[in-house]
Image (tube, rainbow, N blue to C red):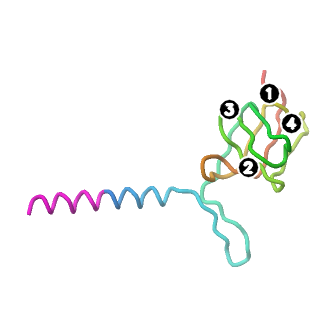
Amino acid sequence: MKRAVFLLTALLLALSAAGAQASRDEHDDDDDHGRRHRTSSAKFYGTVDALPPAVNNGVWWVNGREVKVSPQTKIKEKRGRVAVGAYVEVEGYFSGSGLAADEIEVKGRRR
């Protein structure tokens, strides 16, 4: 009986932990008007480590983080050009192993 209670308790704890993780996981939902709601947005600053051949489509590496850039990503270059070594502000949402960028703004070169 004690073993059954222990196993049941362990199972409930595992399911509870999985449910808590699922509620923290990021995902997109479309509302009735087709707008996307992002449940976990992020913003950070960093230096561009690497760029794909097509700057507006592919994976950037910023401060060792994977940043997914698509043609829909808004790239602002008022304070400098996109290049390895540029200091940028990245806004987006978590997607898989990295961050899917909505907007990247070049802030200049890191000083």
Amino acid at circle 3 = Asn
Q: Position of residue 98 (x, y in %)?
A: 64, 46
The label number, if any, that marks residue 85 in the structure image? 1
Residue ID at (68%, 44%): 43
Asked if marks 3 and 4 touch (Cβ < 8 Å), the reply is: no
Q: Which residue is mark 4?
A: 82
Q: Within 10 angstroms of label 1, few (less than 14), some, or many (20 or more) residues? A: some
Between discs 3 and 4, the one toward the N terminus: 3
Q: Position of residue 35 (x, y in %)?
A: 73, 70
Between discs 3 and 2, the one toward the N terminus: 3
Q: Which residue is mark 2?
A: 101
Q: CA distance from mark 1 to mark 2?
A: 18 Å
Residue ID at (45%, 55%): 21
Q: Which residue is mark 3?
A: 63
Amino acid at circle 1 = Gly
- The part of the image, by quadrant, that contains residue 53 is top right
In the image, 11: left or right of 33? Answer: left
Q: Secondary structure at mark 2?
A: strand
Q: Is residue 12 magenta?
A: yes
| 22, above or below 42, in the image | below
Between discs 3 and 1, the one toward the N terminus: 3
Q: Within 10 angstroms of label 2, few (less than 14), some, or many (20 or more) residues? A: many
Extent of the magenta region? 1-13
Amino acid at circle 2 = Ala
Q: CA distance from mark 3 to mark 1?
A: 10 Å
Between discs 2 and 4, the one toward the N terminus: 4
Asked if marks 1 and 4 touch (Cβ < 8 Å), the reply is: no
Asked if marks 1 and 2 touch (Cβ < 8 Å), the reply is: no
